[in-house]
Structure formats: C-alpha cells, structure tokens
Image (cartoon, grey):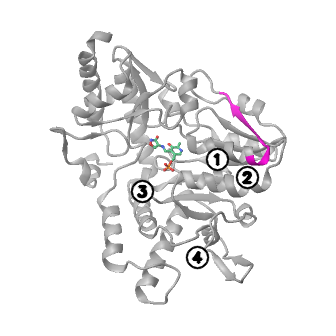
Amino acid sequence: MNIKDIRNQFPILDQEVNGKPLVYLDSSATSQKPIQVIEAVERYYREYNSNVHRGVHTLGTKATDAYEGAREKVRKFINAKSMQEVIFTRGTTTSLNTVAASYAAANLKEGDEIAITYMEHHSNIIPWQQVAKRTGAQLKYIPLQKDGTISLDDVRATVTDNTKIVSVVQVSNVLGTINPVKEIAAIAHQHGAIMVVDGAQSAPHMKIDVQDLDCDFFAFSGHKMCAPTGIGVLYGKKHLLENMEPIEFGGEMIDFVHLYESTWKELPWKFEGGTPIIAGAIGLGTAIDFLNDVGLDVITEYEHNLSAYALEKLSAVEGITIYGPHDASKRAGLVTFNLADVHPHDVATVLDAEGIAVRAGHHCAQPLMRWLEVTATARASFYLYNTEEDIDKLVEGLVKTKEYFSDVF
Ligand code: 7TS
C-alpha cells in the first residue's frame, strides 16, 4: 500500500485547519471520501439522475442498473448468499431498529430475553429497550472483563434457553475491542437464539464474511467506509427476512394495493419503502471497489500497525489513561483516552487549534462510560489514510495540551 497514493485520493486531507495541516483522527465518527466516490455521486446527478424501478426510460434503467449493481457489490463484500439478503437502509441505526421493530416485535413474548453487552453503542441498546417494553421481554447485559474484552464464559452464563436474541458489536467504537462474534453466534444458536452483529466499526476495516460468522443479521453504515452519509446495509438470512413484516409502507415496496389490503414485493425490496437512497448506494458501490482495490487484508494490517504505534506512543504521555485492551492484537484502529483531569472537550479544543480533529464526549455509549467511571473521553480513530506522523502530531498536541493546563498537573 502506497500511503502517498492513498492520501492523494482523499482531496479533503490536503488542507490547513487553523493554520496547520489537517490531521484527521475522527474516522470512527465518519470516514473521509476518496475522489472516486465523490465523482461517482456527481456523475449520477450530472448524467443519469432518475428514479429507480419505475419508468422504462433510458436514464431510469441506467440508475436502476447502478443501484442494483451496488447491491451486488455489497453482497460480494460481505459474502451473503443472495442479493435478496442485502437491504439498503439509512445506516446501522436504521438497520438495527428494523430488526427490533420487525423481527423482535413479532417474535418476543414475556419471559423471553435479549442479551447485549455493556460496550454497545446507543443504537444497539435503545431499540432493544423499546421492544422489551412493548413485548414484556427482558434485556440482559453480558458483563465485560477489566480490560474491556468479553469472555465467552460470561456469554455462556448470560445466554440461556430463554434468550431469543443476542446482539453484539463486532468492534467497540470506544474500547476498540474486537469481539469474538463468530463464537458468540455459536453459543446463541446452541440456545435457539438469533445473532445480530453491529458491524458499524468492523465492516470498514476488516474482511466480513456473514456466512462464516453465521450471524443472522449484520448491520453497517456506508459513511464510515468511504461512502456518502445516508446509506447503510442490513444483511439478514433469507428465511428470517421472508417471514418478517416491513416497517415502512408506501411506494416501491408493494406488489398489489387494494382498497383494504396490500401485498409486498419480494426481498429485498419489501423493506425499501419510498424512493431509495440512490446516489448513496451508488457511492457505496464505488467505495467498496476502492476498498477492494487496496485490499481489506492490507487495510487491516496497516491499521493494526498504526494502532500498535499509537498505543506505544500515547502510553508514554504523562498523565494519560487509555481505555480498552492494551494488547494491540485484541483491538482495532482507535484509541480512547483521558489526559489527567483535563476535560476531554478541552483536550479536543486545544488539539483542534493544532489542526488535529479528534472526538470528545460519551461517543453514544453512556452505559459504557458509567462502566469506565467517566463522563466523557477523547478518542483518536484511524483509517487507511492516516500515518505515524499523524500520531506523532497527536502526541505533540497532547504535550501542548498538558502545558496549557499545567495547573492541573
Ligand atoms: N454502532 C456503532 C458501533 C457505532 O460506532 C455507530 C456510530 C453506530 C452504531 C451508529 O451508526 P450510524 O451510522 O447509524 O450513526 N458511531 C459513531 C461514533 O463512534 N462517533 O460518531 C458516530
């Protein structure tokens, strides 16, 4: 991987922020977009903007082919058996809400259990809280080990024959932990439960094979993997999706509409009510081409080395607390930390003055913040366009932050 070539494909990186070259370390929130994706979206609007699946005119056919072509790219990217198992959504949040509002609402009853972990993003907590309230099911939490990992013994202790759904994040957006979702899926299945994987932070960075994971549902967002905002994916096993009701009704998703009854289109379209996110899907297809050209394995290894370097350099900063596993082999490309008693928003503000973009806050994981006994943290997250130099600048920025707030040290 030639990092110069890669960086050249991301025009946004070539700019100064607050008089300093931009160091973008917030890819877990949203990644930057390569020129190919920007141009693919532009080309759609300039050359063949049309609605899909409707008219027989040439532009409409071109747009439909591009939209459905993107679905096939997604199918291959996650190794789904059939494109009927690939539903375009607005993102991970919508995908998880769809599983909760459709599958879970219809299949849960009082006494049933849903198992999640303490390291879930709010998107993988609140939909389950809501459906638990509606159905009388109970939400249970798989505990975390001290280092922010999950032990399979704890999974075995939490998942019982009453468990109907297990939903776990593959890579934590706070701790960086890579969770053994394949093994957790096997435990879920032993008890007759289905396995849902939140892949928001994994799909952009590692090879995903839904058949190998044997998960029942897999959710991810395009905007964290070089695609535009507003497009995401829900993968589901066909036999489950076939037995689920849509949650949005209207155009595009129907077969026949009578006065008092209607029938739905076949999969995947019955879950795609209304005009879909056409430009977004086309952009996602192009983003997948880009990631495949670089190679997912290459990206994983590059980021692994980068995060090992970051862990080493950041650990040496006096007064820093790093959250999550300290063993680089157990984690993905992000480091969440606090700097002594300096509020993470102050850390992020001083870094911003140096042109360095990091995220500060609760990262949509308030239960995890409570588990960590903090209210907020700062987070630097990496992607294939980041360099060791970016991390050196972050370390320099943190030293400056310390000087700036020297009274608290
Ligand atoms: N799940 C995880 C693990 C996430 O990290 C995120 C977004 C979501 C779900 C929701 O994704 P969305 O595309 O539907 O919003 N995480 C973050 C983050 O860490 N900083 O900003 C957004």
Label 3 crowd (10 A; few <14 / some 14-19 / many >=20): many
Q: Residues within 10 Å of mark 1 (few under 14, many from 20)?
A: some
Please state which of the two labelled residues, at mark 4 or mark 2, is closer to the viewer.
4
- The CB of the residue at mark 3 lies under 8 Å from ligand 1: yes
Cβ atoms at labels 4 and 1 below 8 Å apart: no
Q: Position of residue 145 (x, y in %)?
A: 62, 24
Which amino acid lies under the numbered mark 4 shown in the image of this protein? Gly
- Residue 106 appears at what percent x and percent y? 77, 56
Q: Is residue 88 left or right of residue 301?
A: right
User: Which span of residues is magenta-colored?
Assistant: 134-143
Q: What residue would you read off at disc 1? A: 127
Q: Residue at x 45, y 43 (%)?
A: 300
**Which quarter of the image is occupied by the C terminus?**
top left
Instruction: Identify the residue at horizontal 77%, vertical 36% (top origin).
Output: 159
Asked if labels 1 and 2 touch by Cβ distance under 8 angstroms, the answer is yes
Which numbered disc flags the more N-terminal residue, 2 or 1?
Answer: 2
- Tell me how many marks there are: 4
Per the image, is 123 magenta? no
In this rendering, would 226 be left or right of 122?
Answer: left
Q: Label 3, on which residue?
A: 229
Earlier along the polypeptide chain: callout 3 or callout 1? 1
Residue 104 tag number: 2
